[in-house]
Amino acid sequence: MSLEDKELIETRFGPLWSGKTEIAFCGSVRTLRDVKRSLDLEGSDAVEIDLQELPGERYAFRFYDGDDRRVVVLVLDAEGEILEEHRAHIAEWLGDMYHETGLMAFDHDAMAALLRKKIAGEL
């Protein structure tokens, strides 16, 4: 785990959930669900976070990977090809709270909800 990974994700792509749920891109609208489906992540433990428009006909898709327990950022081009991948463990955001989650750590939806509450300052 590296605090540098979390800082890179937040510095380059903004705070988690600060992006959009859909973006106009290359003449069409892409939603979180569309991107998740195109990357064959449906049925996985991936919980969508947001989309970020980037310069140069690129965009970023952020999600929580429950299998790996990491926040993931994929930077994609106009064809949907992955150009970059960045990962940071959820414990970088949750701190000691992560180690207190017990079995909840295996519930990807619950962990994503906990992360969202922490980011929103509700915890």
Image: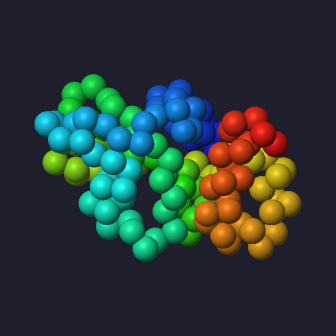
User: From the viewer's perspective, is 10 left or right of 26?
Assistant: right
User: From the viewer's perspective, is 40 left or right of 45?
Assistant: left
Seen at 56% across and 38% down, the residue is 16
Residue 89 placement (x, y as % from top left)? 63, 52
Q: Quadrant of residue 84?
A: top left
**Nearest the camera: 25 or 56?**
25
Residue 38 position (above or below residue 26): below
Whether residue 18 can be seen here: yes
Q: Quadrant of the C terminus?
A: top right
**Nearest the camera: 92 or 42?**
42
Residue 44 placement (x, y as % from top left)? 46, 71
Colouring method of the image: rainbow
Residue 2 position (above or below residue 108): above
User: From the viewer's perspective, is 74 left or right of 29?
Assistant: right
Whether residue 8 can be seen here: no
Seen at 67% across and 59% down, the residue is 111
Residue 82 position (above or below residue 36): above
Seen at 54% across and 39% down, the residue is 17
Residue 15 position (above or below residue 101): above
User: From the viewer's perspective, is 57 left or right of 42?
Assistant: left
Residue 94 placement (x, y as % from top left)? 75, 47
Residue 109 placement (x, y as % from top left)? 61, 63
Q: Quadrant of residue 53?
A: top left
